[in-house]
Amino acid sequence: MANPPKPIAERFRYCPSCGAEIQSRSSSDSRFLCESCGFELHFSPVVSAAALISGPEEKLLMIRRKKEPSKGKLGIPGGFVNPGESLEEALRREVKEELNLELARWSFLGGWPNEYAYKSVLYSVNDTYFAAEAENLEALNLCHEEVESVDWIDPERVSPEELAFPSIQQAINAYLARPKL
Ligand SMILES: [Zn+2]
């Protein structure tokens, strides 16, 4: 690849406030500091929210990703949290957009760091996951721009190589260990 993804801090060549060319980079990947004008910018992780939706026979609803990164691998319905949105609002919005499903119940499983390569930037992400149940699975209707297909997967038997991101395995482990309501 001609332009491999790099952390966002390495993509800054000029100060976005005063326009000075960056001479030396701070040792941190999480902050930009301009030596000319003192402008400071923090690169906090992007946050995502995703739902492990359970169905018949304790199987999980997983999606085949239609887009890079990890195109064709198994993912969990969800997406990035918008500014001003709660985790739960993002969770419900993304599940509705991708699958046309309304969530009836959800409980927090945990959040794990991940890296998400998109075009020329390697984003630092914190993926949060919820165990969830859909109101009515018959409403399922895929957004074909993002989702290739839906598979019902036995979470105890899914192979780690099939998963789009390592955080999904951590979420599945937490899902299997969760106290049953
Ligand atoms: Zn500056």
Image (cartoon, rainbow, N blue to C red):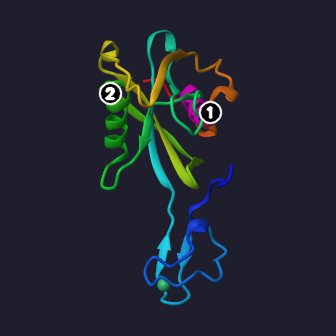
Helix, strand or loop at label 2? It is strand
**Magenta stretch mostly in which secondary structure?**
helix
Residue at position x 59%, y 80% in the image: 22
Can you tell which quarter of the image residue 16 is in? bottom left
Image location of residue 25, percent across then percent down? 64, 77
Residue 108 horizontal side relative to residue 34, left or right: left
Q: Is residue 72 shown above or below 124?
A: above
The total of numbered circles placed on residues is: 2
Question: What residue is shown with label 1?
Answer: 169
Tag shown at residue 103:
2
Image location of residue 99, percent across then percent down? 37, 25
Amino acid marked by disc 2: Leu
The part of the chain drawn in magenta is 168-177
The residue carrying mark 1 has its beta carbon less than 8 Å from ligand 1? no
Q: Nearer the viewer, residue 2 or 7?
A: 2
Give yes or no for residue 41 being in the magenta stretch: no
